[in-house]
Image: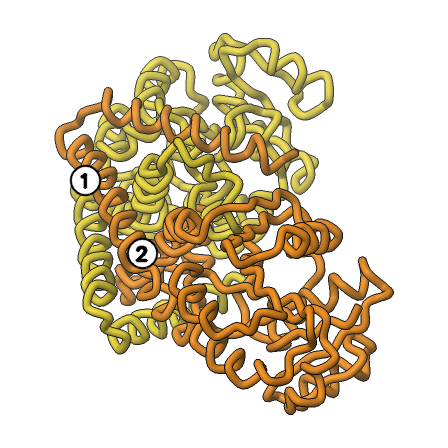
Chain colours: A orange, B yellow
């Protein structure tokens, strides 16, 4: 099996490391505009070969993993189409699905199958040097099939990511994916950015932080070229989630204003219940 | 030096473990209503002796560390006053200062010195079993002296917590403490509770979470008896911080609605800058 990784950054590099460790029979090829990264990856044995010219790689790829920005994805696939191997399976790591699928599916020739996916793991820092096998271990993986996909290729992708160590692998619709990711990922980023940016810079806050502030701002080292795209591609779901969050925030704020201990306690017991539920699976 | 720890839970236990490891000459006594916890602590050598009767402990204590709920603190100190040792130094771990100090200082006899403090470390889970030395290592410590405190006792507390492994030790006014903690701790809790409670429970969100959601909800396993007290005791600062946070949230929401990439990018570059600044000290 020849796999081609498009974009050898944090996520692409983590795929390469995972495949090397878990699937030693796979040949790993990579395409990246940064030829220096490719040289390093080849010299340490992480990839079998790499190139900034897709024509050298794409024709031999049985499996193609796009780990690039959403907008770049549709441009690249357009270029690759004449060179795709018959029967190739293609997947991606994009954090928003419906609009990406709507854009890409109409271009695809019949003899290849694009099964869209989303690894819920580690993209805080950019670049191959931050990639790791470990971030995938036990992480959630979302697969969003469309009527175009062959059952056997969906199953192939499921098996493939299972072998890389992913934990819970869910097969869901693109719209449900966008709904839930708008909540767990995008809303979380909106909140974290708003929190750290509401800090008063004159009081040297870092001397007065505990774990809570560091936890809530850990994702604020954000890729400003990627995230506005993701927010806009998932606008309607995201705005609905922001609205629901603000309702809860307003309810708690009113309770604080009114010294309404009963409401505060109820909201805290509810949050504790939800916390314990969240952890009951993660610890399995 | 005889130290008495009042309340041998998570924080009290962490003090006991830290003192044992770092200051082997100290005798450690504890007061707790849970005599079982005291027996365990004594049997493993964590404390020299413990009692649920303060009259057995307080008269010999040179240093008293209150690690109890804010409301309990003033009740206890009232009971202890006739039994305090001449020259005793008292401190606490309360997350709000001005109102606690206003309540307690008028009661105190002249021959003891209460230097108020706040370790910014680990209180996610309740009980001695969750205590640890490690949570204090490198953590921030805040000391909020009042005109009543003797310089030598403030210095004693600074040296003491430095020896326990705390990192940055700041001496600040009670009001500034409450202002900044209202932001780094209380606002963070308000946000985390609001986020997890805005989840749609019917979609089994835990299968679709990545690190970001887990980070932002880690503190939602919250002590519902403690936190309403803290919120109410620091209401004016906290409400101001909620307001500032909501302004940033509204600004980002509007930018998403309007596909205003420029504003989104600006806010993300700002959050990244602040993230890096926050980490520049924490990694020292």
**Residue placed at 18% from the left, 25% from the top?**
A260
Quarter of the image for the C terminus of chain B: give it.
bottom right
Task: State which quadrant residue A229 falls in.
Answer: bottom left
Q: Is residue B193 above or below residue A147?
A: above
* B267 is higher (above) or lower (below) than A217: below
The picture quadrant where one finds residue A64 is: bottom right
Mark 2 — residue? A195
Q: Is residue A165 above or below residue A80?
A: above
Residue A48 placement (x, y as % from top left): 81, 79
Q: Residue at x 68, y 65 (%)?
A: A15
Identify the secondary structure beneath mark 2: helix
Q: Nearer the viewer, residue A204 or A199?
A: A199
Tell me the CA gap for discs 2 and 1: 16 Å
Q: How many neighbours does mark 2 have within 10 angstroms: few (below 14), some (14-19), or many (20 or more)?
A: many
Circle nearer the viewer, 2 or 1: 1
Q: Quadrant of residue B253?
A: bottom left
From this viewpoint, is residue A209 visible? Answer: no
Residue B266 percent location from the top left of the image? 29, 75
Horizontal arrangement in the rendering, residue A1 relative to residue B76 (left or right): right
The residue beneath circle 1 is A250
Q: Chain of mark 2?
A: A
């Amino acid at each position: 099996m020849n796999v081609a990784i498009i974009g050898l950054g944090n996520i692409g590099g983590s795929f390469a490391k995972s495949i090397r460790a878990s699937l030693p029979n796979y040949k790993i090829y990579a395409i990246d505009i940064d030829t220096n990264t490719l040289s390093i990856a080849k010299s340490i044995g992480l990839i079998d070969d790499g190139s900034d010219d897709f024509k050298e790689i794409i024709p031999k790829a049985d499996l193609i993993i796009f780990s690039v920005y959403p907008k770049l994805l549709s441009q690249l696939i357009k270029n690759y189409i004449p060179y795709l191997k018959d029967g190739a399976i293609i997947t991606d790591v994009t954090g928003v699905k419906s609009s990406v699928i709507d854009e890409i599916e109409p271009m695809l020739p019949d003899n290849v199958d694009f099964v869209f996916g989303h690894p819920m793991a580690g993209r805080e820092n950019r670049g191959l040097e931050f990639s790791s096998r470990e971030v995938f271990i036990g992480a959630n993986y979302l697969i969003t099939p469309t009527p175009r996909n062959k059952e056997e290729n969906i199953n192939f992708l499921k098996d493939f990511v299972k072998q890389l160590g992913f934990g819970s692998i869910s097969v869901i619709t693109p719209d449900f994916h966008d709904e839930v990711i708008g909540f767990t990922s995008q809303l979380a980023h909106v909140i974290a950015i708003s929190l750290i940016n509401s800090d008063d810079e004159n009081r040297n806050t870092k001397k007065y932080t505990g774990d809570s502030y560091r936890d809530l701002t850990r994702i604020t080292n954000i890729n400003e070229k990627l995230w506005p795209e993701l927010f806009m591609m998932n606008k309607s779901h995201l705005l609905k989630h922001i609205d629901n969050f603000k309702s809860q925030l307003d309810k708690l704020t009113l309770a604080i204003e009114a010294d309404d201990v009963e409401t505060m306690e109820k909201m805290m017991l509810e949050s504790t219940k939800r916390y314990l539920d969240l952890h009951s699976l993660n610890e399995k």
